[in-house]
């Protein structure tokens, strides 16, 4: 009898990315009711494009993503990527059966603005309160600001 190996994080993400793109920005399973965005960054060291599915919140014209890394004690790789290369590509479901793709600039928010927006996300999605409680680092909030065409 063979035991099935658990999926690697990259395999897990790839399945979510494929489902997102195949279903106009919607996914099922544990992320079914969570708004997701696909963020494509340029590797800080590798220079290679990497796409990561992330929970997001809308803040006016900006999309906010949260570098929670599941509450781990280190920032996720995508955060280091945007720190080195803030130009990113965003894929987001429009709600009308399509996925919109656009270029954006990633800006890490600071101070009161970061604190207020993270608290609002933790209220919407309680897992984010748990993530912050589980680490001593301040989880970054990153605004994705659409660049002019």
Image (cartoon, helix red, strand yellow):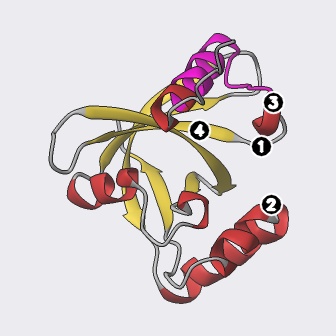
Overall secondary structure of the magenta section? helix
Q: Which mark sits nearer the N-terminus, 1 or 3? A: 3
Bounds of the magenta span?
Answer: 13-28
Q: Which mark sits nearer the N-terminus, 2 or 3? A: 3
Instruction: Indicate which label's residue lies in the foreground, 1 or 3.
Output: 3
Question: Which x, y percent locates residue 45?
Answer: 15, 48
Residue found at x 28% / y 32%? 49
Q: Which residue is mark 1?
A: 34
Q: Residues within 10 Å of mark 3 (few under 14, many from 20)?
A: few
Residues at circles 2 and 1 in contact by the CB criterion of under 8 Å:
yes
Q: Which residue is mark 2?
A: 125
Q: Residues within 10 Å of mark 4 (few under 14, many from 20)?
A: many
Q: Residues within 10 Å of mark 1 (few under 14, many from 20)?
A: some
**Residue 135 falls in image quadrant:** bottom right
Instruction: Indicate which label's residue lies in the foreground, 4 or 3.
Output: 3
Q: 73 above or below 8?
A: below
How far separated are the C-alphas under marks 4 and 1? 10 Å
Q: Which residue is mark 3?
A: 29
Q: Which mark sits nearer the N-terminus, 2 or 1? A: 1
Q: Which residue is mark 4?
A: 37
Tell me the element at label 3. helix
Q: Which mark sits nearer the N-terminus, 4 or 2? A: 4
Q: Quick one: 92 or 122, which is closer to the camera?
A: 122
Residue found at x 50% / y 26%? 11
* Image side of residue 30 versus residue 18, left or right: right
* Image side of residue 42 versus residue 70, left or right: left
Tell me the element at label 4. strand
Residue found at x 74% / y 72%? 130
Residue found at x 65% / y 18%? 19
Q: 26 above or below 122?
A: above
Q: 49 above or below 97?
A: below
Q: Residues within 10 Å of mark 2 (few under 14, many from 20)?
A: few
């Amino acid at each position: 009898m063979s035991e099935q190996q658990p999926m690697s994080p990259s395999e897990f993400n790839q399945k979510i990315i494929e489902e997102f793109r195949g279903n106009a920005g919607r996914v099922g399973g544990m992320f079914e009711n969570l708004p997701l965005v696909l963020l494509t960054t340029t590797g800080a060291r590798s220079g290679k494009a990497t796409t990561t599915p992330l929970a997001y919140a809308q803040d006016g014209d900006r999309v906010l993503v949260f570098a929670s890394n599941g509450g781990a004690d280190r920032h996720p790789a995508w955060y280091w990527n945007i720190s080195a290369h803030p130009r990113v590509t965003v894929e987001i479901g429009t709600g009308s059966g399509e996925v919109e793709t656009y270029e954006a600039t990633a800006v890490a928010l600071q101070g009161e603005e970061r604190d207020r927006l993270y608290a609002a996300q933790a209220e919407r999605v309680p897992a984010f309160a748990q993530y912050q409680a589980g680490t001593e680092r301040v989880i970054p909030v990153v605004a994705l600001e659409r660049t002019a065409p």
